[in-house]
Image: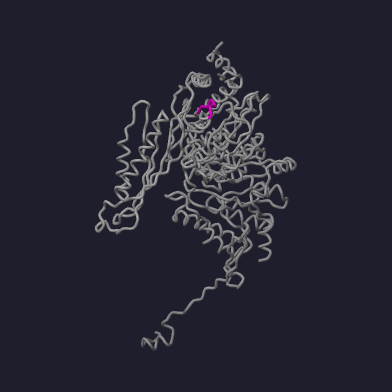
Amino acid sequence: MNKLNKWLKERTFHYRDFDLNELVRLKKEKNLKISLCFPTFNEEKTIGKSIVIMKSELMDRYPLIDEIAVVDSGSSDNTCTIAAKFGAATYAASDFLKEEGEARGKGENLWKALYLLKGDIIVFVDADISNIHHRFAYGLIGPLLMNDSIKFAKAFYNRPFKNAKGMAPSGGGRVTEILIRPLFSQFFPELTGVIQPLSGEYAGYRDIFEQISFPVGYGVETGMLIDIYKKWGLDTIAQTNLDLRVHRNQDIISLGKMSFGILQIFWNRLKECNKNFSMEPNSLILRQMEALAAGNYEVRETEIREHERRPMIEVKAYQILRGKALK
Amino acid sequence: MPVDIVNEVKKLEDKKEEWRNAVSSSREMILSNLAMISQIPAPTFEEKNRSELIIERFSECGVAEPETDEMYNGCGMLYGTTGERNILITTHMDNNFDQFVDQNISITEHRIFGAGTPEDNLALAVLCTLHDIFSRADFKLKSNISLLATTRFNGRGDFSGIRHYMKNCRKRPDYVINLSGITLGQLDYFTLSRIRCDITVERGNFYESPWLSGSGNSTIIVANEIINSILRIPLPRKPKSLINIGMIKGGERFSTISRQTVFRLEVLSEDDSITDSVIGNIQDNCTDIGAKFGADVKLEFFGRHHAKGLTCSHPMIKCAAEIINSIGSRPTMNFINSEISVALAEGIPSLNLGLTTGEGGLGGKSYIDIKPIKDGIVQLMMLINLIDNGICDE
């Protein structure tokens, strides 16, 4: 627990911790190339703004990023046209590595981005963020450039969601709290320190990404996190608070599908590690995230032990009362 | 000898293409500034966060003396070689959308959609990018340019941001150019006489049930009487004058008598004396009707502007109109109650320019066109150039 909270303290950043001039200097000094990839599928409403901001702020104003690319899953809208118009390299995922067979999903786009992009560091940012800002990229590049032992940085944020009346002040993260955190508590307790394991924004070194497999669909974030943790340990992982992320919230049916996909990937990882459900006391501690004052976080532990009662028909007093005997 | 303005504008033909290219190369920066400005809500009196972003942008671009004043107006300077003239370029930061309205924009191939974008967020974005555009265009001036993003423009703000700036600025501007998101070609250089008024009708204690007390006690009925009396105030056709009752709010529910009704109106006229006379009429009517119904009628007048303006024979207006023609647009003149009202009242040659085409409004369908923004900025640069060279001096 102390180790986990120590990691949380040392490896949790805020995007304001990073100075862009300093990041540009470090990037130059380390002679690194950085690529930014937007995996897309019908994102014409948001892709234009995403590219414009990243290009203007992180290529023209601060030369931190060397290339911006869109890897698309076959959008039927104008996503690719708009992306190309504002200067992004656009790739249809299905046009590349055909010999590997067909698949479609965000993970497929990320996996092919490794093949298509040139960077030593690759930043993946979802293209559906309404309040896109360049912090969504540099906040993740920051930990990688500032600390040589960090190889992978993941985003977390406050997530208000849009509804019919406009903006609701809180919400989101339901799959994390209901599915992922209980699973991590039981099987990978150290990963409970990751505040939003399903966040769609992360950055890492190519030599990390190229050594792990990529689930094609919903499980890509969970699989990636577990694999990096298993291969390189918790200390190679960092997380950055990117403040506010506004996106369209998914309905419960979609979240159900997502959860089912994640479960499949999770089960595969459990099989690989030979892990079974344990009733040992330490495995029955649910670890949830608590936001403290001054923007800090702490893992809160609660033992959840489920008790069961036998069928009432087996209880002697009940049998006497009801005049029934166990058959 | 009078200056040949058509010829002076023609002389800029060669430069125009260079400037267009410079604006094109700043396109991403303009749009990026627009996107980030739009992400920060700025209802009137709550512009602080947006003001901080503007200053940050000024600072990052290398604008001199980026600072906010006591009203959170965002100010910056682009110093010219001699400082012979001072040109103030301004637009306002606040808008009518509260913090719960999603103001995030969507950039598509040819258009940008989003609440507030036509209502001057674009103008703010251009203001933040001007220094970068000028650098790329190697656009050098003798004059000093003051960049000003003002607060407290709308409604009860009543232009107090620009008023504060004008009162406290170190050097009085010689010219003022106000920027609007839309519409390119629009050229505004006179303001109407204006006053706004909140009228509140209130009743003391009485039986809540209209069945027992009679519905005539309702403040809505009293307000209705006042409105009818206002509509009976005679207004001349010339000078053109208007009373607009823009907002009304009153009552609580079906079954109770309304105890408070508030309505808001605006008086506009080409002549200050008409506005003065209408104010007197409204005051008299409210006193009479309040006494007749035993209701408490409160009037609050605010936002007084005087009818001021330039004529189309002013060289600055002639230059602007010729420039608008030269970029293939058509100048359309209209009155406007914008920041220029304050400058015009102080006798400073001032005008308002639109930057692109589009459609405004409170709905999510408001948009601006991307392509004409280039011409909108080039027209601004041409006008600044002519002012800088004394062509707009009377």
Residue that appears at 46% across and 34% down: B305
Relative height, residue B20 to residue B250 (above, below): above
Answer with left or right where residue A218 lies relative to residue A292. left
Residue that appears at 63% across and 53% down: A239
Please give the range of residues in magenta.
B346-352
Question: Residue A32 location, x and y as percent?
Answer: 71, 41
* Image quadrant in which the C terminus of chain A is located: bottom left
* Residue A49 in sight from this viewpoint: no
Relative height, residue A192 to residue B370 (above, below): below
Question: Residue B326 location, x and y as percent?
Answer: 51, 19
Question: Residue B271 location, x and y as percent?
Answer: 41, 28
Answer with left or right where residue B233 lies relative to residue A304. left
Q: Is residue B120 magenta?
A: no
Residue that protrudes farthest toward the right in the picture = A29
Image quarter of residue A109: top right
Residue that appears at 55% across and 71% down: A304
Question: Residue A199 location, x and y as percent?
Answer: 57, 52
Answer with left or right where residue B237 lies relative to residue B179. left
Camera-side residue: B277 or A213?
B277
* Residue A167 in sight from this viewpoint: yes
